[in-house]
Amino acid sequence: MADNGDDDAQYRIKGGDYVVLKRGDIFKAVQIQPKKKVIFEKQWFFLDNAVDHLYSTTFEIVSGGVLQPKKLKDAESSTDTKEAGTDNRNIVDDGKSQKLTRDDIETLKEQGLKGQEIIQQLIDNSSTFKDKTEYAQDKYIKKKKKKYENTVTILKPSCRILAMMYHGREPGKICHLRYDTLAQMLTLANIHAGSKVLVFETCAGLVLGAVMERMGGYGSVIQMYPGGGPVRAGVESFGFPAHFHDMLHEFPICHVNALLAGTLDTTAKEPSADSKQSNVAEEKEKQNQPEAEQQGSPEEQNMETNSGADDLEKEQKEKRKEAKAQEKKVKLEEKRKKLAAAAALLEGRNADGLVIASRFHPCPVLMGLLKFLAPSRPFVVYSQYKEPLIECYTKLKEQGGTISLRLTDTWLRHYQVLPNRTHPLLLMSGGGGYVLSGTTVAMDRSKSAGSQRAEEPAPKRLKLTDTEG
């Protein structure tokens, strides 16, 4: 049996980990680095003291940006007030009910008072707090906590948390993909460990990271990317172990047609024969030169000594150029190997799933990538708008080879569940985008064409009537 300490290790914060900071409904993904200042919600602090604590621990920010674990006894100390009014009809919001000014609050902060103590001072100096109803008092305290409590919760990154973070802060980066829609996509595409999945997305790597998390490091994921290289900012925020990245492959979308046609060249290109011949000719000329010419006259030797420094600089420049060229050559070789590995996986045309979520028109991408799927495999396409997916739906119906086509939109509403005041929240997301899903089937073109011809009735001859002219 494993030690309790070993079991706890995976739930503890370590240096270099990617974590998510939470305060209220606001999230931010950061990496824990020693003595690195982090700014979150207009406050700065250091994450050094968070190391070795458990995830989901709430910390209090004290002077100097130091984090201290928040004590349980501090929580909910200001909600003990029992006096409350029956209704709020006589309360007037004229801005004169609070006796403390902004300067007074700043002096309290300078004196070292914590957020909870400042909130208690605000309650004591409010002339209308006791007249408010119990619900209004709770609402007032929550509002002041958001403003004055210097607390932050450190969470372990997950698909749901990162999807909520992106959708709350930068929804445009992920094509306004909502977390409930992402969950439906993973389910409809049947993402599981040991499968081979194709992913084409322009959602900052969020969809790719969600697929990798669901697969748990087993199987293979082929990222089809547009442009010069794949974007994986969201994948880094997940903080996956090293073995997760071994299953990740990349393939440029521009080479798909060449791969389907069988004209893609992934072999290593050798230097041209002309350059080889020129190098050989130069070496022969140097060998054929007489020794006197190679050594030079005494005057030339003196000039050479004077220009020794220049020669050294030239040599250093040449060495730098050679090093850069070698580094470039190594990078190109690595890129070629990655391309060859991804092409080998795709050539079998036996992928287990396809997920598309991008800002580009999905129709040509879907038609090209469907050819790499094995029969009876699911595919999912997400778009912020329904019109591109309607076009995909129509083309798939015309082309055949797919069944169970469904075009759906998702609807989500949050509810406030509290004693005697359960109701839907007033502010909610307007839409979660649209999802087209289906399943591939094997299709024999020759048989289907022949059966269609056999089923067609023979063309009827037109009856001609004799006319006297």
Image: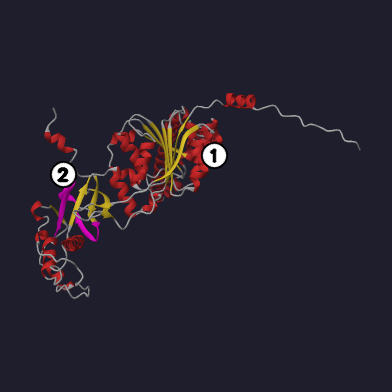
Question: Which of the two marks, 1 or 2, is nearer to us in this view?
Answer: 1
Q: Residue at x 55, y 35 (%)?
A: 399
Q: Is residue 196 magenta?
A: no
Contact? badges 1 and 2 (CB < 8 Å): no
Q: Is residue 238 above or below residue 378?
A: below
Give the residue furthest to the right.
Answer: 469
Q: Position of residue 164 (x, y in %)?
A: 30, 49
Q: Residue at x 16, y 51 (%)?
A: 58
Q: Position of residue 323 (x, y in %)?
A: 39, 42
Looking at the picture, tell me which residue is in the foreground, 106 or 450: 450
The quadrant in which the N terminus is found is top left
Q: Distance of mark 1 from mark 2, alpha carbons?
A: 52 Å
The local crowd at label 1, few if under 14, some if 14 to 19, many if 20 or more residues have their Cα within 10 Å, is few
Residue at the disc numbered 2 = 54
Asked whether residue 34 is in view, the answer is: no
Q: Is residue 394 left or right of residue 100?
A: right
Among numbered discs 1 and 2, the one appearing first in the sequence:
2
Q: Amino acid at mark 2?
A: Leu
**Helix, strand or loop at mark 1:** helix
The stretch in magenta equals: 39-62
Q: Position of residue 259 (x, y in %)?
A: 51, 33
Residue at the disc numbered 1 = 395
Say which mark, if any, is on residue 25. Answer: none
Looking at the picture, tell me which residue is in the foreground, 236 or 401: 401
Give the residue furthest to the left.
Answer: 73
**Helix, strand or loop at mark 2:** loop
